[in-house]
Amino acid sequence: MAQNTPDTMENLPVSAELAQLLRTGPFHLALRSALTARGLALTRVQHKLAQRGITIGVTSLSYWQQGARRPQRPESLRAVRALEDVLGLPDRSLHRLLVPEGGARPETERPPARSYRSLVAPADCLQQLFAELETPVDGGVHTIGHHERVRIGARRELSERESLQVVRAHRDGVDRYVAIHRGDSGCDPSRVRVRALENCRLGRVRGNAENGVVVAELLFDTRLRAGDTHVFGYAFEDGSGGPSSEYVRGFSFAGGQYVLQVRFDEGALPVRCRRFAQASAGAPRTGQEELTLGGRHHGVHVVEQGVRQGILGISWDWG
């Protein structure tokens, strides 16, 4: 009878989280979860692949698990099949996240999406602003990773939010992203400053004073092909609105990782913070969970490994 040895890990048990990721993806999170579950360093994985006649660099493996690159070439897909053996995963469980049955490449297809009208308000205002930019609502990319940091100031106002975002193109020729900011009551779009931080340049900016909404065009220095990824950073400096009591993010596309951090000024700390989710803008809030305000930075955070279509946010109460 075959036994599991350091070089043979056939059909080892998988956790509920890993099983879910193997069913739904995305690929990089499934790979990362499997590596963590098996406790294998990338250098060890590289060695085991070499024993199977597969030559691949540790850097490439690292990029794959980060979502910065995606195996596409035939030799890379062969390495993925060998990875399943090395990690003791079911046959084709990782491979099908890249090339599903029928051979269609998911990175060249637009993932199923929810209408933005069910996720943001007011939808008509956004439609008008996008029309002014002559930009379709579907910009040709979907987010696969997003780390967002929000700062609440001494007047309890939303003073700034900063994003580091990873997107994947689902059509050729994409060279920009339109970011949306909706301030709290009293927000003056003319006082909102947009900064391009990393791998993008600021293009046109439009605002709607009645609804406190700003949209900003972030221009890439390259045109993406379907399946390409791009990492970029940007920030909205606000501070013009009244007291803030929550921060929400709508997701048209499922999958990917989202991290939200909210940091409060030490002179204006809330008495209670909680995480919540919603299926749509008008739906009841579900998945509510108390968050502990801690640390010298006076912050709370949520991490969503595989986001669902809908809304995710953090709310807080003032004393």
Image (cartoon, helix red, strand yellow):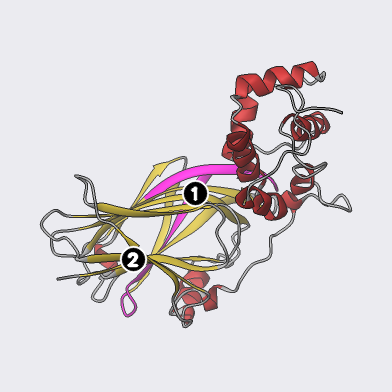
The furthest residue to the front: 1
The furthest residue to the right: 102
Residue 243 appears at what percent x and percent y?
20, 71
Magenta-highlighted residues: 209-234
Q: Main secondary structure of the magenta part?
A: strand
The furthest residue to the left: 267
Quick one: 198 or 116, which is closer to the camera? 116
In the shown orientation, is residue 109 left or right of residue 115? Answer: right
Instruction: Quadrant for the C terminus, please.
Output: bottom left
Quick one: 74 or 197, which is closer to the camera? 74
Residue 30 appears at what percent x and percent y?
65, 44
Residue 232's place in the image compared with 10, above or below, is below
Q: CA distance from mark 1 to mark 2?
A: 35 Å
Residue drawn where x is 73% and y is 23% of the image = 5
Binning the other alpha carbons within 10 Å of mark 1 as few (below 14), some (14 to 19) or many (20 upward) gives many
Residue drawn where x is 48% and y is 76% of the image = 128
Instruction: Let me know if residue 222 appears in the view.
Output: no
Quick one: 185 or 317, which is closer to the camera? 317
The tag earlier along the polypeptide, 1 or 2, is 1
Q: Secondary structure at mark 1?
A: strand
Disc 1 residue type? Leu
According to the picture, the residue beneath numbered tag 1 turns out to be 219
Disc 2 residue type? Arg
Quick one: 149 or 193, which is closer to the camera? 149
Label 1 with label 2: CB-CB less than 8 Å: no
Instruction: Let me know if residue 1 appears in the view.
Output: yes
Binning the other alpha carbons within 10 Å of mark 2 as few (below 14), some (14 to 19) or many (20 upward) gives many
- Camera-near label (1 vs 2) is 2
Instruction: Quadrant for the N terminus, please.
Output: top right
Residue drawn where x is 51% and y is 77% of the image = 280
Residue 189 appears at what percent x and percent y?
29, 68
According to the picture, the residue beneath numbered tag 2 turns out to be 274
